[in-house]
Amino acid sequence: MIEIILNGKKQVLDVEGDMPILWALRDLGLTGTKYGCGIAQCGACTIHIDGEAVRSCSLPVSALQAGQKITTIEGIAGTVLHPLQQAFIDLDVPQCGYCQSGQLMAAAALLSKNPKPDDALIDQEMTNICRCGTYNRIRAAIKQASAHITQKA
Amino acid sequence: MTTSLPLSRRHFLASATALAGGFQLGFTLAPAQADSPKPELNAWVVIAPDESVTIRIARMEMGQGTLTGLAQLVAEELECDWSKVRTEYPTPGQNLKRNRVWGNFATGGSRGIRDSHDYVRKGGAAARMMLVSAAAKQWGVAESDCTVSKGIVTHKASNRSLSYGQLAQAAALIEPPKDIVLKDPKDWTIAGKPLPRLDTRDKVTGAQLYSMDHTMPGLLHAALKNCPIFGGKLKSYDAKQALTMKGVKKVVTVADKGVAVVADNWWRAQQALETITIVWDEGPNATLSSAAIEATLKQGLEAQDAVIGNQSGDAKAAFASAHQIIEAEYSYPYQHHATMEPMNATVLYTPEKCEAWTSTQNAETALAALAKAAGLPAEQCDIHRMLLGGGFGRRAVSHDYVEQAALIAKQMPGVPVKLIWSREEDMLHGHYHPITRARMKAGLDSQGNVTALHMRISGQSIMASINANAFFAAGRDPSSFQGLNPGGTEGVFGYAIPNLLIDHAIRNPPIPAGYWRGVNNNQNALYLESFIDELAQATGSDPLAFRQKLLAKSPQHLAVLNAVADKAEWHKPAPKGIYRGLAQHMGYGSYVAACAEVSVTGNKIQIHRIVAATNPGHAVNPQQIMAQIEGSFAYGLSALFYGEITLKDGKVEQENFDTYEILRMAQMPKVESIVMPSGGFWGGVGEPTIFVAAPAVLNAIAAATGKRLRTMPIQSHSDLKIS
Ligand code: FES
Ligand code: FES
């Protein structure tokens, strides 16, 4: 049993230590985090742990420390949508949408460290699979959100 | 706007009693009850007093934008306020009860819109006419003196107006019109516009529910292992340890082929499954390998038993008198769909009723599979359609996952069970893109004109795999000749070659084959467009000019080709180190072409730019067509560079994305799309541009390296890599 901060609220995870965080989260009804491969290949399960993008299918609950902050797709918006979410809407990025939570979480972690990523950095950091092939629009949306964030700063 | 609201039960019952003789339109429905809170004007349109317009969608959304496109078409004719539009999916059970008032639910072959635009638009138009008629009646004026705009009917002369919400109940009682005139597409204001999709917001907040996410009280989770050897069966298993594990409720056999663990959490079920020792009866294919399949297909290249798909003149005689003969052999492997959402279904079974919540491209087929597995009449079953985390054809025909979920749930009556296939299970039990080879042979005269072409395809028929009876009755599979036909919507061979023979030696390895985005167009276009480039090269011709000459009598094929050549500035030399390749094809009613620009440094291929054009006749949502073009390249280039399912000992060798790679952001080229609807016909958009993705890039690689790659995928048969 471990207590963490999940999307800003205290949450006890009372499951086996070897259960991947993905399946513990989905049992809590946070189904925005998706299963795609289970072996850290596709990124559909990406969440933030203390702001770092992590593939939650391959990290057991036992790897968490008490009080760590976990953010899922359900928790990245504040009173308004995250600039990336808004950009994904503006540019109509999702097709089937199944990979999009993971894409957004990976992109959000990228922008929080590098608010102005260039194409090479986007290529390097955005390694999640999108089978529908929304990559061109994801790239454009990251740039739009980046412009929005850096303008405000 | 929301999607996927369940149909109101009460409302549904009210109209279900009606005899819906007008199959295509549902106009002969009994009028909605006057006290109905949400009057149904017809099967397609429901308008509530709060002005919300619910448009029913029969075809399925899986990312391709059909939901929004179909809603645009109905709304266009309805003349409603687009911001008030929401959508819902009727179930196949409701369709059954209402004499298939919504027609076909099948969503494949890029048919979502091209097969149903006529009757859904009529549904919208009929509803509008009834609303106008209700207003005219209430005011005692002529219908022709009323105008409609954005959900408001106005009688200018008396300065009166009423909203659709106010009129809907009266309108629902009006006799549906018989003569319906649809708008000329050039007058469209909602359809034909690049409107945002209706289903985006929930996909960026995590709120969108896929069938993977479906939940209900008491839900249990199942993990399954099916015999990994095609044609094999379950012999015995030992689940002692599994049954002691945390959360495990039950271990069950699934038909005679698999074992499933049911637990309170899917990961627990999967963990327990892995402790079960299973003995398989390996069956007749236990030694089947890719090498054996290849040998069978190679034999087919020489064989006499080929069915003819397209023939004119006498190719064999023309070869005898040809000045020059050019031959080349190509191959295209099995591919897996690899939808991002693995196969899954939730089923609740009781002896009286069986329901499933699942992702399907054809809920009517899914219903049939469910009913059969449940052992109940279809009338006592239903499928609740959930958004698909990708379809690409995998969820179109075989509903093995629904059947299995039902077989498991049947062993736990009253308990809803969600079966999820692990990614490994998903890769091992695909209905794969079929494997084929082709031998291309051309005869040229002394001026370099193509006088004869023989295209011999050898390989698997999809129809034989999914509908053996129909296949044996027909003795052929028309889909083998997609894009190579003498005429028709399913792909016209555009080149004028006086002596032509295209035939197929059908060789069916015991591997399940299925429709896979683009289907047989993919390899047919790759074979043909690569070879056309080889002929251009052999005659010292420019690949564009060479094609233009052969396509002179195929203006639609030519127009898309010219469009990409113009935009890519084919007439100007490419920047230093950059090489271009072209391809064109026609299929699913649409004409497509692409120009790729690549460079090759050492063994690294870089794709710098793709210019792609499509003429789908009518373009219902141009920005969504662009999204489909972009996505087609990601899918098509994944196949070209990486995609290959191989077999060893009767079993697929690739089990996850580490061995079945998918194109990612870093490799994705920038795609510039040209949507150029000519009007006059309705073509598909979800698949067509995939046809030209691989051949355009292959032709550019050949231009860059002087070497022709003929065996796919590139990664397994060349030291070239995409970077
Ligand atoms: S599900 Fe975690 S990376 Fe694929
Ligand atoms: S939007 Fe479908 S997998 Fe990315």
Image (spheres, rainbow, N blue to C red):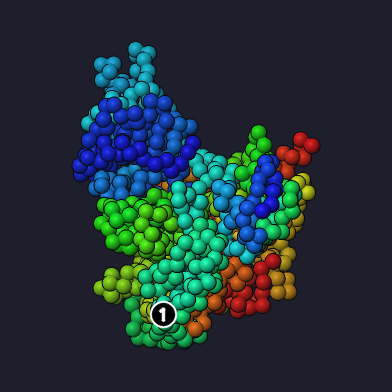
x and y percentages locating residue B659 in the rendered image: 60, 72
Residue type indicated by callout 1: Lys
**Going by the image, does B196 lie left or right of B465?**
right
Q: Circle 1 marks a residue in which chain?
A: B
Rendered residue at 32%/69% (across/down): B467
Residue B220 visible in rendering: yes
Q: Which residue is mark 1?
A: B235
**Going by the image, does B218 lie left or right of A126?**
left
Above or below, comparing residue B512 to residue B681 in the picture: below
Q: How busy is the neighbourhood of tag 1: few (under 14 within 10 Å), some, or many (20 plus)?
A: some
Rendered residue at 26%/20% (across/down): B137
Q: Is mark 1 within 8 Å of ligand 1?
A: no
x and y percentages locating residue B540 in the rendered image: 58, 75
Above or below, comparing residue B117 to residue B168 in the picture: below
Ligand 1 quadrant in view: bottom right
Q: Which of these two is toward me, B93 or B200?
A: B93
x and y percentages locating residue B620 in the rendered image: 45, 44
What is the residue that sits farthest to the front in this orientation?
B244
Residue B452 visible in rendering: no
Rendered residue at 36%/57% (across/down): B413
Please tell me how many numbered marks the rendered image carries.
Answer: 1
Rendered residue at 22%/35% (across/down): B30
- The C terminus of chain A lies in which quarter of the figure? top right
Q: Quadrant of residue B124?
A: top left
Above or below, comparing residue B238 to residue B581 in the picture: below
Q: Which of these two is toward me, B683 or B464?
A: B464
x and y percentages locating residue B39 in the rendered image: 32, 31
**Going by the image, does B263 lie left or right of A3?**
left
Q: Which of these two is toward me, B562 or B599?
A: B599
